[in-house]
Image: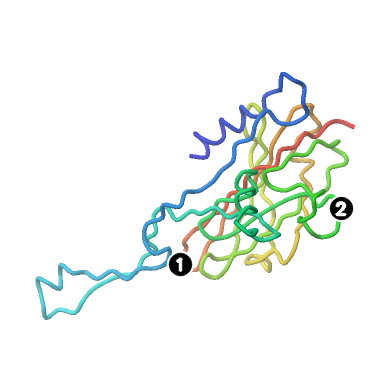
Amino acid sequence: GIKLGWQPLLQRGLQPRSDGTNVPLFKTFLAAGSDAHGDLNYEATMDVTDFLSKASRALNGYAEDNALGRIFTVVYAPQGEGARGENILRALHDGQSVASNGPLLIAGFDRNSNGSLDDSEDVGIGQDISIPLTSIPPLQLLWVSNEEFGPFQSIRLVVGTSTGELPPVEVPVPSAKGLSSGGLVPVDIRPALKGGSPEWKYIRLEGRTLNTAKEEFRCYTNPIWIKATGE
């Protein structure tokens, strides 16, 4: 779905605007559905067939993580949902969200360097920034998981251009921070952008965790659009 459906739309949205406006042509956001089947947890299933054919035999069964379509959308609403949920709706509309089946991962530019991504001047997921390449601040990452989903094994930074996505860049995850970043973690994205350009690009992140049962869980962020101009 991401490669065949989402990526082509992201590429088209990077085409130049005819009106000369310094914003992306259009943005396309990733969101998960709400049609999850099952209990979103582990289900115990009894083997009824054996029980009926051999009534004296003990019940057999097994437990499984049975929730098909359990990927959900999580929005970034630092001021809460709002009196009528308006902050959630605004975040969905603006693409300030991630899609996950367990762990959470967000990113942004802390423009005022105060250790928070909540300020109006900061640039987060779903937003855009045009800035000289040499002035790009570190991209700040924040992640969290738990024992059910396991620690982060991989965080990949993906840069998209109008002709396709560049090879992902692996972001190191310290073993001591597998379950939580413990605050903002800075990443210099300037080498990944491959130099300044008058064209818009986007950056997005993919996170992967693994629990003790060797089950894998993922989180995909919406992009941040960036135009990294020359000097």
Q: Reply above or below: 78 against 224.
A: below
Q: Residue at x 69, y 52 (%)?
A: 171
Image quarter where the C terminus lies is top right
Label count reads: 2
Q: Residue at x 54, y 54 (%)?
A: 100
Distance of label 1 from label 2 (alpha carbons): 42 Å
Local secondary structure at mark 2:
loop
The dot on residue 125 is: none
The percent position of residue 76, horizontal first and vertical second, equals 65, 55
The percent position of residue 181, horizontal first and vertical second, equals 70, 63
Tell me, what colour scheme is on the image? Answer: rainbow
Task: Please tell me how crowded label 2 is: few (under 14), some (14-19), or many (20+) other residues with Cα within 10 Å.
Answer: few
For residue 172, side relative to residue 74 (left or right): right
The percent position of residue 149, horizontal first and vertical second, equals 52, 64
Amino acid type, label 2: Asn
Task: Please tell me how crowded label 1 is: few (under 14), some (14-19), or many (20+) other residues with Cα within 10 Å.
Answer: few
Q: Reply above or below: 51 against 98.
A: below
Q: Say which of marks 1 and 2 sits in front.
A: 2
Tell me whether circle 1 and circle 2 mark residues in contact (CB < 8 Å).
no
The dot on residue 112 is: 2
Amino acid type, label 1: Ala
For residue 157, side relative to residue 214 (left or right): right
Task: State the residue lying farthest toward the front.
Answer: 83
- Image quadrant in which you'd find residue 126: top right
Q: Residue at x 79, y 59 (%)?
A: 116
Which of the marked residues, 1 or 2, is nearer the chain's N terminus?
A: 2
Q: Residue at x 47, y 49 (%)?
A: 33
Task: State the residue lying farthest toward the top.
Answer: 18
- Image quadrant in which you'd find residue 27: top right
Q: Which is nearer the eye, 124 or 5?
A: 124
Local secondary structure at mark 1:
loop
The dot on residue 213 is: 1
